[in-house]
Amino acid sequence: MPLAGVLYFGWRLEEVMVLFWAESAVVGFYTLLKMAVVGRWLAPFAGIFFVGHFGAFMAVHFLFIYELFVRGLDARGREPGAVEALTSLFTPLWPALLALFLSHGVSFGLNFLGRREYRSATISGLMAAPYRRIVLMQFTLIFGGWMVMALRNPVPALALLIALKVIADLQGHRSERGRGTKTGE
């Protein structure tokens, strides 16, 4: 759907890329909540480490997404102030961000708490699960960035991200719900 939206319905490519990035932040937030449920006294320490480590990857990825897709390769001169740039970027995305936040929240409530997935979860498994997204984003930025520079067209990078994300989400869902592993995203 995102690829069709960009190609046929006027969705802005940079907004879709930022939205995929933002979903990782939402997953990170719910990972912290899961860690609080599972980790008890260990949760604050593991949470601080997770926020620092995962947050650093998120910050670097956002910088690359911003430079490659939002500003673009042909951007010259100074960028507007950070607050104005971020406001103009995230304001149109708030309905989608809210939907992502609520969707992951419902899954947290129904599956992790309601179906008691926390009983088989471990702190280390919970901390590791969101890094699949980080690897996915890293791969997309490296190879997608190369495609953007080589082809002077960002759409192939979006197609790569969508394909990898769909595969990763399906595998993650199967492992969480189908086989009952100790990770959980």
Image: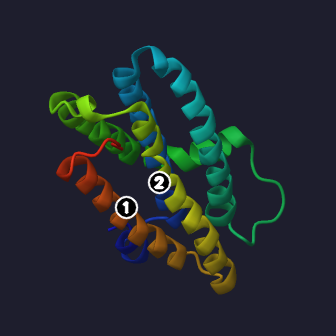
Q: Which mark is residue 73?
A: none
N-term-proximal mark, 1 vs 2: 2
Estimate the x, y position of residue 59 in percent, counting from the top left: 64, 45
Q: Nearer the viewer, residue 21 or 175?
A: 175
Q: Which residue is mark 2?
A: 133
> Is 69 situated above or below 58?
below
Residue occupying the far right of the picture? 77
**Residue position marked by numbered label 1 in the rendering:** 168
Give left or right: position of 148 versus 35.
Answer: right
- Please determine whether, in this image, residue 60 is positioned above or below residue 31: below
Contact check, label 1 and label 2, Cβ < 8 Å? yes
Identity, as a three-letter code, of the amino acid under mark 2: Arg
| Residue appearing at x 26%, y 34% in the figure | 120
- Is residue 10 at least partly visible in the picture? no
Q: Amino acid at mark 1?
A: Ala
Q: What secondary structure is marked by label 2?
A: helix
